[in-house]
Image: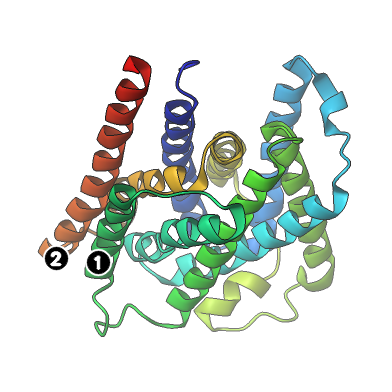
Amino acid sequence: MARSPALTGILFAIGGTLIFSVNDVSIKFLSGGYALHQVILIRAFVAMAFILFVISRSERGFSQLATSRPSTHLARVCIVMISNVTYFVGLATLDLADAVAVAYVSPIIITLLSIVFLGEKVGPRRWAAVMIGMLGVIVMLRPGAGVIQPAALLVLISAVMYASGNLLVRHMGGTESAMTLSFYVQAGFIVVSLAMGLWVGDGHLATDNKLWAFLFRPWIWPPLEDWPVFLATGLSVGIGGMMVTQAYRTTEAGLIAPFEYVGMPLAILWGLVVFGTFPDAVSWVGIALICGSGLYVIWRETVLRRESDAA
């Protein structure tokens, strides 16, 4: 892995995406009874505890939290916050697999933005793999079949913001560690969630609309049986977020983006196990295209690495 930073970044992206899938299913599970800002607050405290533990055990310790780029961190916190809120509000209404499928617009956005803003070069074969993956997403969306709705549009907004946030990570990677980047995001979540709780935590803006009830319902004290779910979402975002951040700060965004498609099979599995939903034949075609494109990119990167080592 030390000889292949690209492979290391790919493995971090795959591992982080798989762990992140626990966050998605946990928040969808909690969306029926809790306000989003309450869920995010508890999640952020759990994630922050994990991040602080890792920082305390790292070689540089807490000194790495000092930064000369506070405004860039603030911009990234705002972007990630918008991405999370729009995604989770949409997720509360859509089936898990549909929401994840719509969110996978982000890799193609990352690839496009990485060329425009980062000057990265993406070869034709990698372009082909990303486009095949996107074709799989389109197959799963089945335009005109009722999937494109306001909730799905919120997830699309989330995908654009997510892509922008990851490009910022790539831009900041030279001076900021993955732990530093994760720390400031979770700190931002805590501040914004507490502010939301003080403003609407009493439920005075709550409505019967399912799409917006998740944002404005009153805070409640979680029963004992829900705390493991809160713990799971906090640990998954802490660990998974750090891994994906490390992938984007060390490796070309255009190479990392397609590997986030591995979350699609996990979304199908979680949907079956937790919510009792199962994809039909058309969805399986989309899954095959998505996973096939990711596997091809892995194979292509391995071939190029071997050719480079031989040279």
Front-lying residue, 116 or 134 = 116
Counting labels gives 2
The secondary element bearing badge 1 is classed as: helix
Residue 145 in the image: above or below residue 225: below
Residue 61 placement, left or right of 163: right
Q: Is residue 44 above or below residue 1?
A: below
- For this view, does 268 lie left or right of residue 236? left
Q: Amino acid at mark 1?
A: Met
Residue type (three-letter) at the residue carrying disc 2: Val
Q: Is residue 270 visible?
A: no
The residue under the point 56% across, 61% down is 116
Q: List the residue tagged with mark 2.
A: 282
Left or right: 311 as drawn, with respect to 173 = left
Helix, strand, or loop for circle 2? helix
User: Residue at image x 58%, y 78%?
Assistant: 212
Q: Quadrant of residue 302?
A: top left
**What residue is at 53 percent from the left and 83 percent from the top?**
209
Q: Which mark is residue 183?
A: none
Residue 168 place in picture, x, y as percent = 66, 52
Check if mark 2's residue and mark 1's residue have beta carbons within 8 Å.
Answer: yes
Quadrant for the C terminus in the image? top left
The circle drawn on residue 140 is 1
Q: Position of residue 181 (x, y in %)?
A: 72, 40
Q: In this image, 279 relative to 134: left or right?
A: left
Residue 101 x, y percent position in the rendering? 35, 62
Residue 145, given in percent of the width and then of the height, sits at 24, 82
**Mark 2 neighbour density, 10 Å: few (under 14) some (14–19) many (20 or more):** few
